[in-house]
Image (cartoon, grey):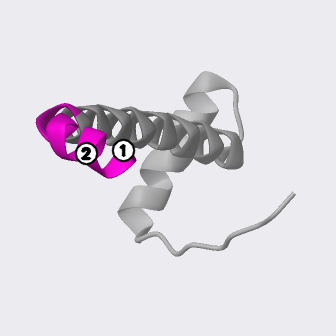
Amino acid sequence: MNEITIGLPGAEWAELADLADATGRTPEDVVREAVRAHLRAEREKVAEAAGRLAEQHAPLLRRLGE
C-alpha cells in the first residue's frame, strides 16, 4: 500500500475526527472513502467528456482511421 501525508487546518482536522468518531471509523478510513468517491466521480466526468468529444469529432476521427 502506498502512503501520502497531508496537512489539514485545525478546523478541518476536528471536523474529520468528529465525523470518524460519529460513524465508528478512523479518520484514515473516512479519507480513503472520500478519495475513492472523488476518483470515481472524476473518472465518470472524464468518460463523459471523452464521449462528447468523440461524438463531436466523429467525422474527423473516421477520416483519420482510414
Confirm whether the magenta stretch covers residue 61: yes
Q: Is residue 34 left or right of residue 29?
A: left
Q: Residue at x 81, y 64 (%)?
A: 2
Q: Quadrant of the C terminus?
A: top left
Q: Secondary structure at mark 1?
A: loop
Where does residue 39 sit, x and y in percent of width and height?
Answer: 49, 43
Q: Quadrant of the N terminus?
A: bottom right
- Asked whether the residues under the numbered discs 2 and 1 touch, taking CB atoms below 8 Å apart as contact, a structural biologist would say yes
> Which residue is the extreme one toward the right?
1
Q: Position of residue 27 (x, y in %)?
A: 64, 47
In this view, 63 is above or below 21: below
Front-most of 7 and 49?
49
The Cα–Cα distance between marks 2 and 1, rounded to whole angstroms, is 5 Å
Report how many numbered discs are placed on residues in the image. 2
**Secondary structure state at the residue bearing disc 2:** helix
What segment carries the magenta color?
A: 55-66
Badge 1 local density, few (<14 within 10 Å), some, or many (20+)?
A: few
Q: Which residue is mark 2?
A: 63
Q: Which residue is located at x 31 percent, y 51 percent?
A: 64
In the drawing, does residue 22 fall left or right of residue 59?
right
Magenta includes 40? no
Residue identifier under label 1? 66
Q: Is 7 placed left or right of 27 in the picture? A: left
Q: Nearer the viewer, residue 1 or 65?
A: 65
Q: Nearer the viewer, residue 25 or 36?
A: 36
- Answer with the quarter of the image where residue 29 lies: top right
Main SS category, magenta section: helix
Residue type (three-letter) at the residue carrying disc 2: Arg
Q: Which mark is residue 49?
A: none
**Residue flagged by tag 1: what amino acid is it?**
Glu
Residue under the point 16% across and 37% down: 59
Q: Residues within 10 Å of mark 2 (few under 14, many from 20)?
A: few
